[in-house]
Image (spheres, rainbow, N blue to C red):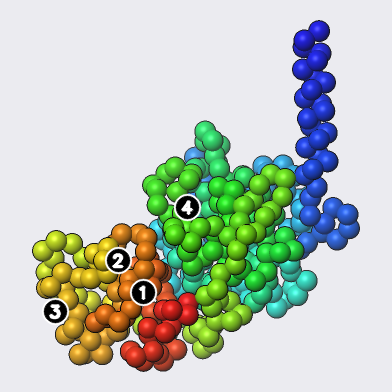
Amino acid sequence: MRFCKNIVTIAVASLLLQSVFVPAGSAGHKPHIRIIATGGTIANSPDGRMGVDTVLEQVPGIAEFADIEIRDYVRIGSSEITIQNWIDIANVIMEELRNHPDTDGIVVTHGSNTAEETAYFLNLVLDTAVPVVVVGAQRQRTTLSEDGSRNLYDAVRVAAHPEASGHGVMLVVNEMIHAARDVTKTLSYRPETWDSGDLGVLGLADIDRIRFYRTPLTLHTVNSRLHLGEITTAADLPRVDIVYTYADAGPELVEAAVAAGAKGIVVAGFPTGSPNPAIGKALTAAEEHDVAVVMSHRGGRGRVQTGRPFTSADNLTPQKARILLMLALAHGAKADELEDIFLDY
């Protein structure tokens, strides 16, 4: 008798869930979502990287939310991603949008190690208001508690959502919607790795609905002044290196960056936003050779105050400050303009 009662309870719960969880577009038009596949753990299995079409077949119900088309751009790990890949991914997205103007959203599958960098680059260069969502995973497919299926499921739902436009490029993982500018990977393997620091997430991808709570005020996508334009190859972007600050560090890494032809240096300074004396002296010498210097910090949270000897990266991580500095210099920004650029973006 108790067994029968449990069956009834489960059946009722299932009906309730179905009544709440109504796919977007189920009453009529289904959104058109295009997936740009680049590889990463989300498509990885013990037997090698799978095509996204195979991955989609293993995600029940995802086709109820959108008509999905796939462009298999590349299948590589995120540690292999290059600046040229960033440029190519951006061009692939814009090409897909030109060729398919009915596209309602773009999803980019990506490895987790550099997903935040790719997402921020796209956030600065894409000239579109169409929602773009980057998605990855921490655990391989077919392994215990793999997270890729739910992440991809949520990424499609967010890209298809009518309120997704206007937030810039987003990263959707672990049931959270992050702004590309703010998010960073903080843990090696656990799925709660993604964190947006002091500013928090844009919204949540809960099972019953997508909810947005804020939108970024910094410049991005259609409002950005840093679109690719004539930038077609990695060689069109200036070299920018990152130098890490630590106790008793010498000037050698700064000097090596200058000797290698760096046009900009981003410093992962102490959490207060300063280098040690030897690095500071080398950075001043670098500026005298027309090398732009931007000060970030190694602590992970908080701003670097403005009005100091070097340009403040605001609250950007060193890896994202490098991307912004590369694009700013490529667009002809002068040293006295960089502070405002880092405040704007």
- Of residues 33 and 46, the one drawn nearer to the viewer in this rendering: 33
Marks 2 and 3, how far apart in space? 17 Å
Residue 321, x across and y down, in percent:
38, 72
Q: How packed is label 4: few (under 14 Cα within 10 Å), some, or many (20 or more)?
A: many
- Pointer 3: residues within 10 angstroms few (<14), some, or many (20+)? some
What residue does disc 3 label? Answer: 281
The residue labelled by disc 4 is 194
| Secondary element at tag 1 | loop
| Mark 1 in CB contact with mark 2 (< 8 angstroms) | yes
Label 1 sits on residue: 313
- Among numbered discs 2 and 4, the one appearing first in the sequence: 4
Q: Three-letter amino acid code at disc 4?
A: Trp
* Disc 3 to disc 4, C-alpha distance: 35 Å
* Residue on which disc 2 sits: 297
156 sits to left or right of 326:
right
CA gap between label 1 and label 4 equals 21 Å
Indicate the quadrant where residue 2 lies: top right
SS label for mark 4: strand
Q: For the residue labelled by badge 2, is the local secondary structure a helix, a strand or a loop?
A: strand
Is residue 47 among what the camera can see? Answer: no
